[in-house]
Image (spheres, rainbow, N blue to C red):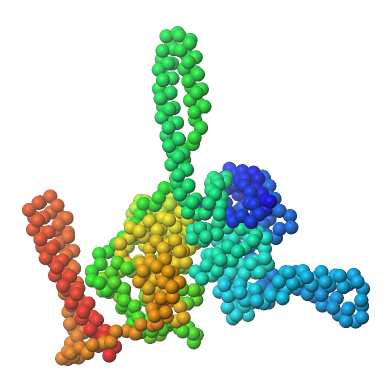
Amino acid sequence: MIDISVSGLVKEFEVGKKILDGLTFQVDAGERVGLLGPNGCGKTTFLRILTGEVHPDEGDIVVAPNKRMGLISQIPVYPAGYTVEDVLDTAFDPLHQMEEEMNRLSQRMADGESDSALLSRYDKLSAAFQTGGGYETDTNKNKVCSGLSIPQDMRERLFDMLSGGEKTRVNLARLILEDTDILLLDEPTNHLDLRATEWLEAYLEKFNGTVLAVSHDRYFLDKVVRRVVEIQEGRAEFYSGNYSFYAVEKERRYEERLKQYEKEQAKIQQLEKAAEQLRIWAYSGNDKIFKRAQSMEKRIERIRQTDKPKKDRKMEVRFGEREFRGDEVLSIKNLEKGFSGRTLFSNVNLEVEGGERIALLGDNGTGKSTLIKIIMGEEKPDGGKLRKGPTVKVGYLPQIIHFDHPERSLVDTMLYDLDCTAQTARNRLASFKFRGEDVFKPVSALSGGEQSRLRLCMLMDSKINLLILDEPTNHLDIQSREWIEEAVEDYEGNLLFVSHDRYFIDRFATRIWMLEEGGITDFKGTYQEYLSAKERGRLAEAAVPVPPPEKKDKPKRPGGTKNLEKEVAAAERAVAAAEERMYDLELSIQEASADYLKLQELYEQRETLEEELAHLYAQWEGLAADLEEAHGA
């Protein structure tokens, strides 16, 4: 049985630019279908047409009669004063109506009425009420709220006062409680933490209805969908498998079409050359040869079947990197932070060394972004210490992108930020897929994903050795996510990131910081290794907050901290002087590029100076650590 039938759908918002151009496909009852395509290809437009919010220019959509359909991203307007609990209860409106009628019938029977039709109606209602889960509404509601991280205090709040993400989560809970026949999911995992996403995946696995999902969460697509419909240039292309199958099959089809196209082009060139020769011979007056040339040209036209397959250009960019000296990147001791009397985390003790790639995970509201802000110096801890290595330079992509001058165009933003030429700015923007007239748009006109892309474009010019990313793949389509992954793959410095994108976590994490119950579980290993260890229950010991190592009494320096402060200042001056000498030496090397003998001498000087600098850095780090301990004592 067909649940959704789409036939010849056409829609354009600008004359001559069809966003949907004859879209045709069907979804059978009980199917799990993923609707894919880059941002702007028409996925959301299609969902709006499907729910009646937008009308197509041509074509038809037919939904099976008597099937209830619910769209996650479409949040209904509720009466003023509705709490989250009231919104959730609207899922049980048919059951409530049955219960009210049963109460009225029960009262009539209590008053002495004994009509057989009345008894029959009550029995039917009672059976339907029980079958529909009327006696289990509170149990089901609590189960769904627990799974989707909707706590009791949130259920008591006014629905209108919730954030967009919280409203989406509540609406998802309401649709699940309604037991909808056809679930339309538009980026359902965007506002869910890992635990809630896993709960939703488990729910959909047992769901008896039909699922049509628009999602950029590749892990979610792998777990949930069994067929992929990709919208390309307004039309549908079909793949009979999950996301992983789609990714491999799409590449195979591209290679196959490319080979077919190249084969046809080679044949056409061969025939065109032969036809041209025949025409030359035909000028001598031989009509038969002329007809053969015409026949060959018609054959060429018949061969022109395959258009050259298109493949989006990759963004050929990479993060700037600064050479890292020393092993210490980040040291955290007894860190704690809370808000409004609630402790987010306490007694956090962590050490980060060079080359580590750390995923900071945890449920929404546990304090992941707060910890990142403390590391960045945007928030102050309530207690404890945090120290970055002296040669660490941080690059930071926050979850919420902010520009000081959103009224500026993209190219002006680059000019002011990077102090570069207009051509350099345009080249950099073009490498991030901002081309043509797009570079003159104001930053305020960009979508969330485009603003993330612009911020990355600015960030990648910096020389950094600690890259901090807070939800880097949010608002990005699959292609853009894959591009960011390629850029991060090439980056060789330290990486600390917060993400709910399990593909991203799987690919990069070599260490997991799980923030839960006010502490951090520090697991050295990949995400899959972490999950395996968690399954085996071997994290209990690791979850216990690790006390900082006992301080060894160091011999006190004569003169106390004043002498130590002078030594630190002297070490800093020595480092600065050596760095200045290194800068002058590099200039001399550039100037002597044509003098081999001079270059050899300068290279030897640089090698000696590098050794001296390494020694000075180590001395400075040791003295700075001693001074910090002396102040804390």
For residue 262, say whether it is visible: yes
Work out whether 232 lies above or below 400: above
Residue at point 77% right, 69% down? Answer: 128
Depth order, front residue of 534/107: 534
For residue 573, say whether it is visible: no
Q: Looking at this rendering, what residue extends furthest in the top direction?
A: 285
Residue at point 60% right, 44% down? Answer: 21
Residue at point 53% right, 64% down? Answer: 189
- Residue 131, x across and y down, in percent: 73, 69
Work out whether 119 lies above or below 217: below
Residue 127, by quadrant, is: bottom right
> The C terminus is located in which quarter?
bottom left
- Residue 23, x across and y down, in percent: 61, 46
Q: Looking at this rendering, what residue extends furthest in the front direction?
A: 536
Depth order, front residue of 196/608: 196
The answer to whether residue 227 is left or right of residue 517 is right
The answer to whether residue 230 is left or right of residue 356 is right
Work out whether 5 lies above or below 481: above
